Amino acid sequence: MNTPEHSPLGRSTPYADRYDPSLLFPIPRAAKRAELGIDERAALPFHGVDVWNAYELSWLDARGKPRVALAEFRVPATSPNIVESKSFKLYLNGFAQERVGDAARLTQRLERDLSAAAGAAVEVRLSSAGVAAHALAELDGELLDELPLEIDDYGPPRADYLRVEPGPPVQQVLLSHLLRSNCPVTGQPDWGSVQIAYAGAPIARDGLLRYLISFRTHSEFHEQCVERIYMDLLRRCAPQRLSVYARYTRRGGLDINPFRSSVPATPGNPRGARQ
């Protein structure tokens, strides 16, 4: 059974230096979605994608010369599986001594293997490792983090903090850099920024920030945290339109950035200062 407890996370693992797609460890999304009341047999209550960035990708060209690149992977939220991050890193490291030829062939191989693991088509884009191609750009939004709040609750997540306030409908983009959750297997912290864009009754900002901080001791994968935030906001605040985008800091040369939205949308991939 492919559960987090059976993954390579938290275990001493030899690092292969040859290509091996069997290293990829898929984990079904269904169990965690069922906890949120999402029935995958019906249409999902959101659209979305998980945007991964890999900063430690290298391979050998046809002459044996090492090449390096940055890679962007887009895994659709409709895929039945996520790919466990340590297995992803082990898989990518397997290209270090592998002769692939050119970047186009590598892209094709990555798309084929990752699509097979995720159970849906994964998009891959390779780009130069040069600084000019990757300028820093923060998420837009009104920052919540300086609200003068007394905080004494750091988990589990408290959806009852979320509430709407009296007033006409608004369109707002709110931002916090205080998101923190933990790996459900190793307990290692995952740090991130989260952007919430919505249209509807005004969401109380103090309650929203308290809610986000209540993830601080919570253990779930990145994708699961974002879907929990989305579903709690949807049920407690009933916005007419909603999107949640989390940008997590990298660990092991990878960052994971889940995006969920009530309407079809293609998020950008702005690399923040902490990434």
Image (cartoon, grey):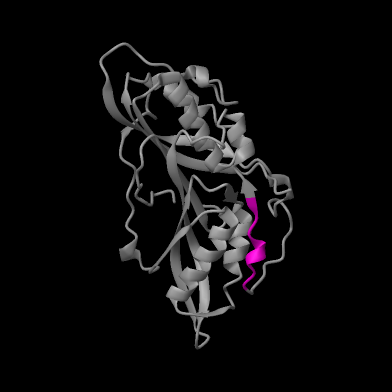
Is residue 25 highlighted in magenta?
yes
Q: Quadrant of residue 8?
A: bottom right
At a point 74% along the width and 49% down the height, the residue shown is 6
| In the depicted structure, whether residue 256 falls above or below residue 39 | below
Regarding residue 247, the answer to whether it shows in the image is no
First to last magenta residue range: 19-26
Q: Quadrant of residue 17?
A: bottom right
| In the depicted structure, whether residue 219 falls above or below residue 16 | above
- Pick out the residue farthest to the top: 166
At a point 49% along the width and 72% down the height, the residue shown is 106
What percent of the width, then of the height, locates residue 206? 40, 20
- Pick out the residue farthest to the front: 42
- Pick out the residue farthest to the bottom: 63
What percent of the width, then of the height, locates residue 34? 61, 32
Is residue 48 highlighted in magenta?
no
Regarding residue 252, the answer to whether it shows in the image is yes
Is residue 14 found left or right of 211 in the rendered image?
right
Q: Quadrant of residue 182?
A: top right
What percent of the width, then of the height, locates residue 194? 42, 37
Is residue 148 found left or right of 58 in the rendered image?
left
At a point 52% along the width and 31% down the height, the residue shown is 228
What percent of the width, then of the height, locates residue 40? 56, 37
Is residue 235 found left or right of 190 in the rendered image?
left
